[in-house]
Image (tube, rainbow, N blue to C red):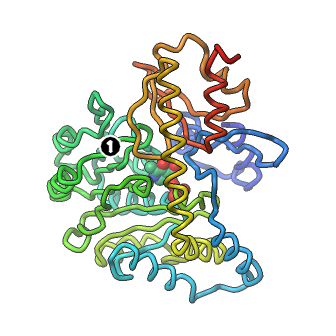
Amino acid sequence: MLSNRRNWLRQMGLGALSISASRLNVFAEKPSPYAFHKLSSGENLIRLRSNENPYGPSPMARVAMNEHVNTSNRYNWDLYPELIDAIARKNNLTPGYILLGAGSTEVLDLTSRLAALNKGSFVMSLPTYPFWSATLENLGLKKISVPLTADKKNDLPAMLNAIQPDTQLVYLCNPNNPTGTICKHDELVHFIQEASKKAWVLVDEAYIDFTSEQSLSHLVSENKKLVIARTFSKIYGLAGARVGYAMANPDTIELLSRMQSWPNGGISVVSAAAALASLKDEAFVKQTYTLNQEARSFTIEQMELLHIPCIPSHTNFIYFSLVNHQQDFFAQLKQHNILGTDIYEKQGKWSRITVGTISEMQKLINAIDTAHA
Ligand SMILES: Cc1ncc(COP(=O)(O)O)c(C=O)c1O
């Protein structure tokens, strides 16, 4: 993984640049989990690592992408407002509440950099989705990690207690990655009211479309300290297209957009067209939702029969404990050409697996069921 990163840096001509030691340390300590695996059709790799949609892009998105390839020589000024408008309507907001990013990663990054204009600390759960926090640490902010509850949920009261006078940002992933748990809506509303009196609150709703929960988007008109990050990478199946967006009060959107050299301009024409078409393809979203639920129930049921306890999931991934598993789980995956993740919590040997298609999940179960081997 690390050597991939080094090769990439070398290819980008960055190897010769004087990257600060702290940045290199970040690479050394936290190699990206998104190791690059070839997608050639002959490979037969079952990718259950990055919570991608195994069915997407949607049919309508594929058509739109093809159509826009031929106009990729142009800056398409019209497409971005159209996409912003469609996103705003979907969320019962107006366009001033939306900012586009190259994946929700860019939104997490912009919000981090906005918060880091003042030095101090930031608060996040442990474990949660961390691939924005290095920016804050590199900008000199101190991380405050708050353990999850025993049932693997974000511990909202403990997170509130953890906020210090110098805390600049509180990050909440709901549903949480890697655990797949959600917080109750009224408890979340109270948490945001309290936390935003003291710091920026960044709520990551990457997986909200896999739940029947309400987004917190209705809070942004009243609350200028709240930023909600959303993505087209998950239920819309556009991870490689890199489209995400922020929802926030227009005053906050203005502050965030000042951190972008070209506000809303980081998305390719092809990707913007795909996102726009995806919003219209409701049948595809419904189908993904249902197929994910079926494959998820099947997997949890089968894993529990194999004495692998699972946390009830509200997402397209499952968090499970390998504490009773006698075999080397990761060797079993490797042997069957399945790409999983790692151990997130040593105590209890908790790991995560993405919900793929039902046939992929059947192969996963066969791989870990010794009776089958
Ligand atoms: C919770 C969470 N937030 C954000 C992201 C990044 O998504 P994007 O592809 O939109 O940058 C991911 C990706 O897996 C994620 O799990």
Residue at 32% in and 59% down: 115
Q: Quadrant of residue 151?
A: top left
Label 1: few (<14), some (14–19) or many (≥20) C-alpha neighbours in 10 Å? many
Q: Nearer the viewer, residue 181 or 250?
A: 181
Residue on which the image places disc 1: 124
Residue 337 falls in image quadrant: top right
Count of marks overlaid on the render: 1
Asked if residue 373 shows in the view, the reply is yes
- At 55% from the left edge and 46% from the top edge, which residue is drawn? 51
What residue is at 62 percent from the left and 19 percent from the top?
369
Image location of residue 256, percent across then percent down: 38, 70
Closer to the camera in the image, 151 or 212: 212
Q: Is residue 132 above or below residue 142?
A: below
Q: Is mark 1 within 8 Å of ligand 1?
A: no
State the image coordinates of residue 339 (x, y, percent, origin top left): 66, 35
Q: Nearer the viewer, residue 305 or 159?
A: 305
Q: Determine whether 350 is above or below 266 in the image.
A: above
Name the image quarter holding the C terminus: top right
What amino acid is found at the position of numbered circle 1 in the picture?
Met
* Horizontal and vertical percent position of residue 252: 31, 72
Image side of residue 222 versus residue 336, left or right:
left
Is residue 142 visible in the rendered structure shown here? no
